[in-house]
Image (cartoon, rainbow, N blue to C red):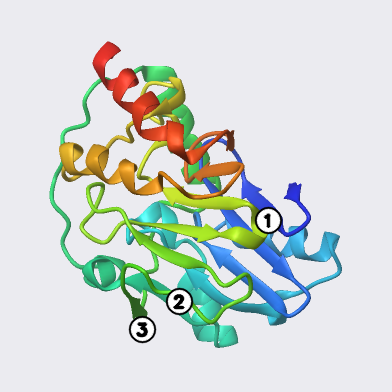
């Protein structure tokens, strides 16, 4: 799905990943589920590009539903995979804390697991090698993505700001479709390690010049990043 001249999405409102497309090459932000590799190839074919045009994959964090095809592209095509140092062990399959599920509705929950099953998400291929990044880095990748530390959902959660694409990809720093309840609109993501820290991190989006705020789960959100923290806090207050 084309969102803008340099911005594409693969997947859907259940699980999504993003492509930054430039003449020099492509940056992939998050890798969804393993079955999204087919979606990736189809999207690339539609714009007359290929896997060989991908210069790197940037992970917003190290959870399994964002690792997807990353190791396969790293291993088979030499595509480097970038992740914050604090989530590098998680991306390699290290332990992660148990978090409470909170409210659940059966329909959305079954929809999420059914989609994950169709996209081969029941068996995660963890990373063997990663390139560790830090808050504030501008990566030498197409679109010059900037790393913004967003600890809370996980210690190494990041947002990826790409001015060329007029977008900031936020991973699970927030959601616009809660995978356990089906609630839509800006709100906190489930399975968050430190919810208070995650809310505080949203303030770091203020001041970014972007039209698109792009979560890993839910529809792309159009609006100013300045508004995000207040809207999510209001959603928490009314939930």
Q: Which mark is residue 129?
A: 3
Image position, residue 112 (x, y; %): 45, 34
Marks 1 and 3 sit apart, C-alpha to C-alpha, by: 24 Å
Q: Are marks 1 and 3 in contact (CB under 8 Å)?
A: no
Image quarter of residue 44: bottom right
Residue closer to the observer: 114 or 233: 233
Residue at (38% x, 21% y) in the render? 181
Say which residue label 2 marks. 81
From the image, which quarter does the C terminus lie in? Answer: top left
Q: CA distance from mark 2 to mark 1?
A: 19 Å
SS at badge 2: strand
At a point 70% along the width and 82% down the height, the residue shown is 52
Which residue is at the far top? 238
Whether residue 74 is visible here, answered yes or no, is yes
How busy is the neighbourhood of tag 1: few (under 14 within 10 Å), some, or many (20 plus)?
some
Cβ–Cβ under 8 Å for marks 2 and 1 = no
Q: Secondary structure at mark 3?
A: loop
Of residues 18 and 180, the one nearer the viewer is: 18
Tell which circle, 1 or 3, labels the residue nearer the N-terminal end. 1
Q: Is residue 75 above or below residue 97?
A: below
Residue at 44%, 49% in the rendered image: 170
Question: Residue 2 vs residue 38: left or right?
Answer: right
Which residue is label 1 attached to? 39
Q: Residue at x 59, y 85 (%)?
A: 77
Q: Earlier in the sequence, mark 3 or mark 2?
A: 2
Please, is residue 85 above or below residue 195 in the view? below
């Amino acid at each position: 799905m084309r969102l803008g001249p340099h911005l594409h999405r693969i997947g859907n409102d259940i699980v999504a990943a993003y492509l930054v497309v430039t003449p020099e090459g492509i940056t992939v932000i998050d890798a969804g589920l393993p079955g999204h590799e087919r979606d990736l190839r189809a999207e690339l074919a539609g714009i007359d590009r290929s896997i060989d045009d991908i210069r790197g994959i940037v992970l917003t964090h190290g959870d399994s539903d964002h690792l997807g095809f990353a190791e396969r592209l790293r291993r088979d095509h030499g595509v480097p995979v970038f992740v914050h140092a604090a989530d590098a062990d998680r991306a390699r399959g290290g332990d992660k804390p148990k978090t409470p599920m909170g409210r659940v509705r059966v329909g959305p929950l079954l929809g999420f697991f059914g989609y994950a099953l169709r996209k081969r998400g029941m068996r995660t291929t963890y990373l063997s090698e990663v390139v560790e990044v830090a808050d504030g880095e501008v990566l030498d990748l197409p679109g010059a993505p900037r790393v913004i530390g967003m600890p809370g959902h996980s210690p190494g959660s990041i947002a990826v700001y790409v001015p060329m694409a007029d977008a900031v990809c936020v991973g699970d720093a927030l959601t616009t479709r809660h995978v356990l309840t089906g609630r839509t609109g800006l709100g906190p993501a489930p399975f968050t390690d430190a919810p208070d820290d995650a809310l505080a991190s949203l303030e770091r989006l203020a001041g970014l010049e972007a039209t698109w705020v792009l979560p890993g789960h839910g529809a792309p959100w159009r609006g100013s990043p300045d508004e995000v923290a207040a809207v999510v806090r209001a959603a928490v207050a009314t939930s």
